[in-house]
């Protein structure tokens, strides 16, 4: 079953638009490195020799805003200045930005909140970024922030009680059970491969791609050190709801979070398998602590709710969501998981260039 | 005040998606003439000499579907066949369709109902078609059906009680008061001029534009013969609601339907003032009676509701809408306006070509 649910829509209390400060911090941090990347790696002369009337940018997994607008403004302004400096005024192209996300994304909210003073023509593109969404050779810049950790489907063996990878009673992989981790990792590599194959068709030769990828540190020898206390806690809450008789315990066995956190070495290896892109830059982003402070339990719970509620209510039913996230908030308070975090998550930035075709 | 409200969203009982059979009949009727127009007037050789990798089509005022999908499929299939016949396989471009409507349009419903088997990449573009919405020289085909009768704003003098054009107690122009008609006609000409100026920038030279325009017959000498019994009836209902104390009578004076029905001679004259387009074909569409039968009063009332409710509730408040349209349905039954229509509305088809620039 493909995972089709998107971030919470609208602009209400539980919306992604109102509960994505953490993700915004990442976007803010990536601004400088994206600006540098464009200035250094965007070959205006080569692009304009193929008569670019329109410079087309796509944000893959844009959600409802406002984070995507910050990222797109950075790219448009930097590229615009570079064109302006290196070409005559009449050769400066128009800019068009395509906001892509799953079809279930709340595009109405996205469109209603587009910055009125933007310097680009805007369009929304519904559909999974694991497939083609654009005509051949039609994009000059692709961007994606905090989205490539989502799997397109859950690997079957994780849901199969006869498989050694059966993830009973858990909703996330953990290093303890290697088969589960491997199933996640294999699906991730497949998904990234689909992503790169699709983008290789859509990007013009010389086009750039900036990816901001949620990762964990390179494991030394011990994969079991990779843990996600806050997701494990969410799993505990689901089990408790099952014990309260809200749904069968088997419901928890058949639910898994379709997210995987790769690590820089693995990410690099996956990219290098693809011959269409060259890595111009790869590095771990240094997210300043102001973007990284532990919010209060309620705010943290809302952030997770904005991201995972669609998925959870599809599986467990929308009637349990308030109870689930109230319990989650309580448990976060009790376990002090946020006050004393065993922090393993980090963010890796990659800048890629579509290499010239050998045909 | 610009008119920003769109057709009723969603797929429920009062939605445009469920209440646009009449408009669908027009789209169905236009299919053949559009196919002919593409086959005869689309100059594949000239277009491909400017290396078209992507053939880009925009539907201006697409609403929520499904009518727009029928029109877009006709255009894509016909153009695709023509490319396929006249060029080698490797030169056949990808197709990209842009669905444009006001920002308040329900794009979520539009995206969720996109035909899964479509042969084009889809994108939504929010914003008024009276302004630029696309990069320069980026479109090859523009389409618009049953939308150009909408004014961008109501002319001020119609709302001004010191003006001879004050439209007191009415919600639509009528030939009786020439000043009102003239104010509508003047705004229409301005709006069409903006529309053509914007499209002239967006369409490539040689690009085509197919317009299906709601019109009335050319008036002989008597403009007062132009009447809209069904709109007048809606006005009567609003006055009756004011008499019932639902709102002040002045509310009706300050409300007017921002729609104007041009006539073929006037439309032709407006287009010819614009030097950027050449008229390839202009004719009145012969809508077969199967698309034109008088539906029952309830269905007719729902069609009007799907189109005008957004506008009406913005002005009068959403709490009166059920009462208003119940009364409207009753009055349609009583006056037999549909059984014995004084039919003046018709539809004019125009095919335009973006002429080559003189620069």
Image (spheres, coloured by chain):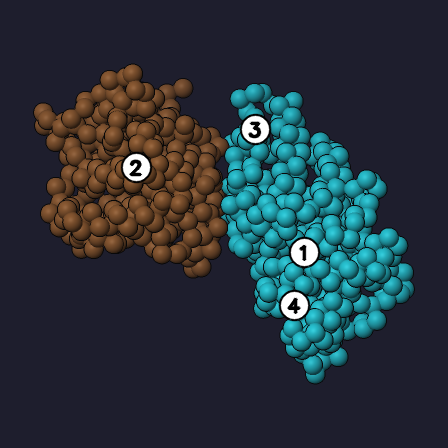
Chain colours: A brown, B cyan
Looking at this rendering, what residue extends furthest in the bottom direction? Answer: B162
Say which of marks 2 and 4 sits in front. 2
Residue A62: percent from the left, percent from the top? 38, 44
Name the secondary structure under disc 4.
loop
Residue B135: percent from the left, percent from the top? 51, 47
| Residue plotted at (67% across, 56% down) | B305
Disc 3 designates what residue? B117
Say which of marks 4 and 3 sits in front. 3
User: Around disc 2, counting alpha carbons within 10 Å, would you say few (fewer than 14), some (14 to 19), or many (20 or more)?
Assistant: some
Residue A166 visible somewhere in the drawing:
yes
Disc 4 designates what residue? B154
Residue B142, above or below A17:
above
| A333 and A150: which is toward the camera | A333
Mark 1 or mark 4, which is nearer the start of the sequence? Answer: 4
Residue B207 visible somewhere in the drawing:
no
Residue B71, above or below B175:
above
Report the number of discs. Answer: 4
Q: Is residue B300 left or right of residue B16?
A: right
Disc 2 designates what residue? A242
Displayed quadrant of residue A220: top left
Disc 1 designates what residue? B305
């Amino acid at each position: 079953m493909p995972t089709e649910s998107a971030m919470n829509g609208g602009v209400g209390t539980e919306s992604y638009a109102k509960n994505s400060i953490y993700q915004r911090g990442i976007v803010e941090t990536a601004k400088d490195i994206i600006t540098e990347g464009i200035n250094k790696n965007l070959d205006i002369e080569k692009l304009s020799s193929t008569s670019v009337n329109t410079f087309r940018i796509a944000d893959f997994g844009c959600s409802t805003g406002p984070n995507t607008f910050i990222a797109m403004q950075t790219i448009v302004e930097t590229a615009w200045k570079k064109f302006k400096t290196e070409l005559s005024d009449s050769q400066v192209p128009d800019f068009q930005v395509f906001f892509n996300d799953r079809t279930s994304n709340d595009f109405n909210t996205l469109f209603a909140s587009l910055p009125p003073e933007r310097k680009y023509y805007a369009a929304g593109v519904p559909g999974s970024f694991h497939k083609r969404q654009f005509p051949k050779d039609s994009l000059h810049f692709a961007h994606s922030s905090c989205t490539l950790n989502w799997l397109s489907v859950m690997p079957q063996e994780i849901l199969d009680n006869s498989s050694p990878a059966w993830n009973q009673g858990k909703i996330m992989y953990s290093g303890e059970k290697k088969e589960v981790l491997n199933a996640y990792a294999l699906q991730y590599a497949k998904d990234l491969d689909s992503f790169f194959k699709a983008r290789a068709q859509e990007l013009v030769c010389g086009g750039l791609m900036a990816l901001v990828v949620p990762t964990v540190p390179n494991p030394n020898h011990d994969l079991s050190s990779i843990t996600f206390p806050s997701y494990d806690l969410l799993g505990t809450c689901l089990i408790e709801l099952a014990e309260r008789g809200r749904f069968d315990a088997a419901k928890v066995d058949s639910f898994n979070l379709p997210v995987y956190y790769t690590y820089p070495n693995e990410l690099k290896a996956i990219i290098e398998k693809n011959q269409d892109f060259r890595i111009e830059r790869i590095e771990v982003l240094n997210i300043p602590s102001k973007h990284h402070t532990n919010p209060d339990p309620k705010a943290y719970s809302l952030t997770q709710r904005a991201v995972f509620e669609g998925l959870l209510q599809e599986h467990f039913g929308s009637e349990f969501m308030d109870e689930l996230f109230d319990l989650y908030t309580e448990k976060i308070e009790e376990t002090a998981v946020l006050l004393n975090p065993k922090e393993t998550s980090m963010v890796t930035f990659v800048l890629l260039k579509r290499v010239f075709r050998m045909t």
